[in-house]
Image: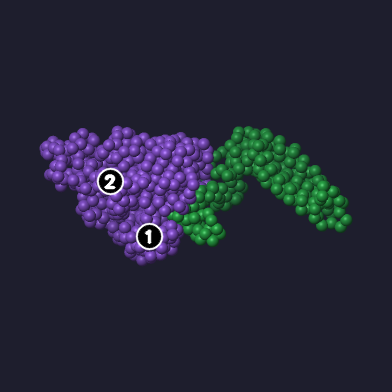
Amino acid sequence: MSRTGFYIERVGVVQRLNPMTKLAAALLLIAATFLLPDLLTAPLIFLAALVPVSLLANVGRSFFGVVAKIMLPIAISLLLVQGLFFPIPNPTPVPVGPLTFRLEGLLFAARIAGRLLVLAGAPLLIFLTTHPIDLVQSLIARGVPRSIGYILLVAMQLVPSIAERASAVADTQRSRGLETQGNLLMRARGLLPLISPLIVGVLLEVEERAAALESRAFLAAGPKTTLRDVPDSPAQRWARWALVLVFVALVTWRVALVFS
Amino acid sequence: MTAIIDLRAVSFTYAIANGPALRNLSIAIPPGQRCAVIGRAGAGKSTLCALCAGFIPDFYQGQISGSAVVDGQNVIQQPVSELVRHVGLVSSNAFSQISGARFSVYEEIGFGLENLGVPPAEMIERIAWALRVMQLEDLRDRSPYELSGGQQQRLVLAAMLALQPPVLVLDEPSAQLDPPATAHLADILRDLARQGTTILFAEHRLDWVAELAERVIVLDGGRLIADGPPAEVLIDPLLLERQIGWPHPAQLAADAREHGFWPAARPLAVTTVDLLAGLRVGLATDQRAWSPQQPTAPDVNHASAGAQAVTADPGHTTTAPIVQLEQVHYLYPSGVAALGGVSLTIGAGERVALVGHNGAGKSTLVRHLNSLLSPSAGRVCVAGVDTRTTTVARCARHVGIVFQDIRNQLFARTVRDELRFGPRNLGYSPPRVEELVEQALQALDLVACADMHPYDLPLAQRRLVAIAAVLAMDTALLVLDEPTAGLDNASIALLRRLVRGLAARGKSVVVVSHDLDFCFEVLERVILMRDGVLVFDADWNTLDTHVLADAIGLPHGLYVAQALELPPDSALNALLTGGPHPSVKREA
């Protein structure tokens, strides 16, 4: 994983959208897959909204790659488990070779898989097209505490850097004759010298980093400025309101449907 | 002029410590001064830095008394968040000072400015300036985490410079920089001071202190023991007495004086320029310095002389090489070539310096010496076995490597346990393990702290523990990566003794270092790398000094001998490049 997570630096219409606009659109699409009961809702949203947007944003390849990596194993196991064992009296049999699937189960699996497709795909598109700092800054501008924003950003970079440190520790201890291959007992014995320097290192760093953040005025009083310009426009503000309205309308319609 | 840093009778004891870290310290520093703080490891230098930047007692808790005012602010009372506009601190570990919240060098420098609410237009200007000053323009879009140690150090300095604090406090700013970068930093700090910035810096490298500082404060056990201009303080015998040491030019000048080559009334030099000037005067008046050296005076202390003694020993010349590299190429997974056909052999009793710029391929080469990396093409043999057919753990019987980042190494509860780990892994019998551990403890003067936790020791001693832990493995070859980084002179003296002792016992040592004076004093053979290939592999007497000078500079003695154009067989040349150093005598 790169330091900026999924983000791919490209110039395009989608990249120029305000993160909040993208967030509002994603939320609406996700809500729609749950609120519109038709089996085809989710696949339609995926094909008619997410796929064109990913192509428009010039991140199609990564989008399909990640979606396939996440969704294929889930979809296959859903179809197998639900398709074969869906708990229903008198299921409609669908024989496939030596196996007998249950139609209700297959439909249920398809519905869940479709929802997951949108649930994973929409946020993924945001991450692919939005610089993490822009996303965090937009959140902070809407009231998320700065410290939470900081933790989000730091976590993205810390994971790869801890992984690098772990391999440096392993190199160091192997150079001291530690056998990292071999039977379970030998490996278990090697755990302490591998893990302990990592933990001590991280703990020491926490203190030093806290001091460094203070040195860099993180806690200084007064107004802040930002180096990155997060794009926005009156049109987008209107669009966001419109998206919220559609969302409210959808919910109202569903609730009304339940009570009617 | 009123002082911008004004400490009066400050004493401080850390919450978990037994004794005070600072004792009754009173210092007044005027604006625009470049003031160095020197002293042995644990003398209180870092504590003084933290205090002046307001981190005590707000961040590092403990008992404090006295008063401390910096740029009109009471740094004992005020929180750091209010002091950042007045004083900025850069500490020695660059990695942990990267904010982690920004993804490029450019944005990282902007982070502090954003927090201070600097308007974007000004912010962009200041970042551009900081990038230019710290020579980071080519790296502006790189992730801070993908930089080398030296580059990261330049980045955290740039980020602090961009904040433009009136007082800049630097704790070992040169620790991870190579010689050209260190010289460049001195120029920058001089410029800043000229424009009015006050600079307080703690430093072990006394040569650099002599070049940069206008004033030197010496701490010992938290007490101020000397304070004055470098030309006076850095040749104070008290510094030798307290094992703080002198800068190299002062040592060389003292050697010259002992042999009558230094003008009688002239004070000893602390900088290279002064040393040259003094020697020129001495040479003009005393022709003896030019005369050929007496053949009866063998220079037993210099590396090459010692090496001759070792190679003359028939017991070592017949043994097989410990490590042999044949046309080794190495490509990173990204396809970038890190080594482009390296061949070399390291035999018993050799002392080798591996030098070159950051990124020249030194670390990659070292990782081939014990099979951590396997060559993409070519062959590496350790004790006659191809490293492709063996494991790192097996190579560890023959080659011990001490890496620079000792945090990756130390894990045991006591120093003694830490030392036992390696020899136990190698399968030595318990009595032999204990014997090796005791020898290593003694070699690095760690007997007194053998039962302490490694992390309770000051950083310099922790590095000695890391070295002792690999030394205890009793390998035929010991590889040390930047062993002198962050060490005080007393610890470096221990290392010098260690390396000489190992060679005398037929063990080999490879040192990767930017510390050319250390290399010159104790190592015989020099391998210079550039862009993944060997530029030369020669001993100090035969290597091409011009090539070395262009690449990374020269050790003081060699530089001065060249600048004075001394005949190779002259007495003064022998003194500068091979004669007995007073430091060596003191160790003996």
- The residue at 49%/52% (across/down) is A170
- Determine whether B421 is above or below A38 in the image: below
- The image position of residue B358, as x and y in percent, is 40, 40
Please tell me which of labels 1 and 2 falls first in the chain. Answer: 2
Q: Relative to B214, is B113 on the left or the right?
A: right
- Determine whether B473 is above or below B301 in the image: below
- The residue at 75%/41% (across/down) is A45
Indicate the amino acid at tag 2: Thr
- The residue at 43%/63% (across/down) is B413
Which element type, helix, strand or loop, lies under badge 1?
loop
Which element type, helix, strand or loop, lies under badge 2?
helix
Is residue A106 in view? yes
- Numbered disc in front, either 1 or 2: 2
- The image position of residue B96, as x and y in percent, is 46, 50
Which disc is residue B457 wearing?
Answer: 1
Is residue B515 in view? no
Q: Relative to B198, is A113 on the left or the right?
A: right
- The image position of residue B375, as x and y in percent, is 47, 41
Q: Are marks 1 and 2 on the same chain?
A: yes
What letter labels the chain drawn in purple?
Answer: B
- The residue at 86%/57% (across/down) is A89
Q: Tell me which colouring the rendered structure shows.
A: by chain
Which one is nearer the viewer's eye here, B36 or A170?
Answer: A170
Which one is nearer the viewer's eye here, B449 or A8?
Answer: B449
Distance in Å between CA atoms under marks 1 and 2: 38 Å
Which one is nearer the viewer's eye here, B206 or A167?
Answer: A167
Indicate the amino acid at tag 1: Leu
What letter labels the chain drawn in green?
Answer: A
Which disc is residue B513 wearing?
Answer: none
Q: Where does label 2 land, which residue? A: B311
- The image position of residue B66, as x and y in percent, is 33, 60
The chain identifier of the residue carrying mark 2 reads B
